Image: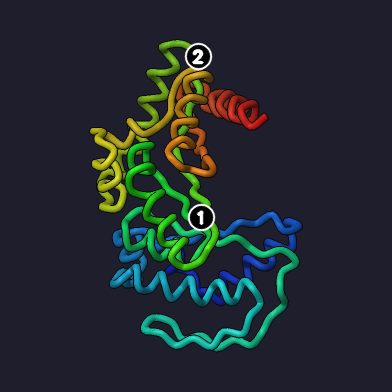
Amino acid sequence: MLQAFTRHPVALAQQALTVQLATSGRLALGVGPSHATGMERLGISYERPASRMAEYLRVLRGLLDGDPVDFQGEHYVVRVPPGLRPTRRIPLLTSALAPRMLAIAGELSDGTATWLAGPRTLAERIVPAITAAAGASGRPAPRILAGVGVAVTEGAGQAAAAREAVSGNFTRYAALPAYARVIDAEGLGSPADLAVIGPEAEVRAGLERLLDAGATEILAAAIPYGDDAAGSLDRTEEALAGMLG
């Protein structure tokens, strides 16, 4: 998932088309508006992020498809002749959690990639909103990637170390309004409570709850923990690979 406003859509389209060619058509491109604090410290305005994101997606989609783009909006002016069409269409995903951004994602992209959205928030807010927006625009059912921190543990000591690591890594998210809202919507006291931690069977069950809530895919972020951080990552990644099988 890339920060949209740090990259002009023409530059990003050129990069994406190059990666698509280099990876034999395996790219799925995700973009999002990021957060006010992240953009403003770079000197980038965060005024009207939803409106700006809608224009960005309209321009980017045409460029990714190799179409001519003649667009003049409030935020972007782009005039580009037809380009080379990719051999395989590049899926375009938008990070979206709030109602307006979900509506934009459903209308103008192929789906959303979330972060810190638990089963309750997915089922009650995210999945219905983006699915309705896609349907109203005549688009296929959207892809919904549920981003979640994961740590597979063995024994109480590893589980405690994993929770400590997650708490340290996730604390900063509570200060960001977009994430604070979904944490509150889930009814949990801490962003760390949204991570899936435990033995392989418990992790599998936790990921299945996200799928049952309407996620179409899991975007698992393996969390290193304990004195053997590399070993903990290997343990989690091996377990996730087994679940794929």
Tell me the residue at 37%/42% (across/down). 123
Tell me the residue at 26%/48% (across/down). 181
Q: Position of residue 44 (x, y in %)?
A: 35, 71
What amino acid is labelled 1 in the image? Pro
On the image, numbered disc 2 is attached to which residue? 154
Q: Nearer the viewer, residue 15 or 140?
A: 140
Task: Choose top left, top right, bottom left or bottom right for residue 217.
Answer: top right
Q: Looking at the image, is mark 1 or mark 2 earlier in the sequence?
A: 1
Residue 116 in view of the camera: no
Q: Nearer the viewer, residue 41 or 71?
A: 71
Give the SS element for disc 1. loop
Residue 159 in view of the camera: yes
Q: Position of residue 29 (x, y in %)?
A: 57, 59
Mark on residue 142? 1
Q: In the rendered view, tell whether residue 73 sits above or below residue 18.
A: below
Q: Position of residue 133 (x, y in %)?
A: 41, 62
Tell me the residue at 46%/68% (across/down). 137
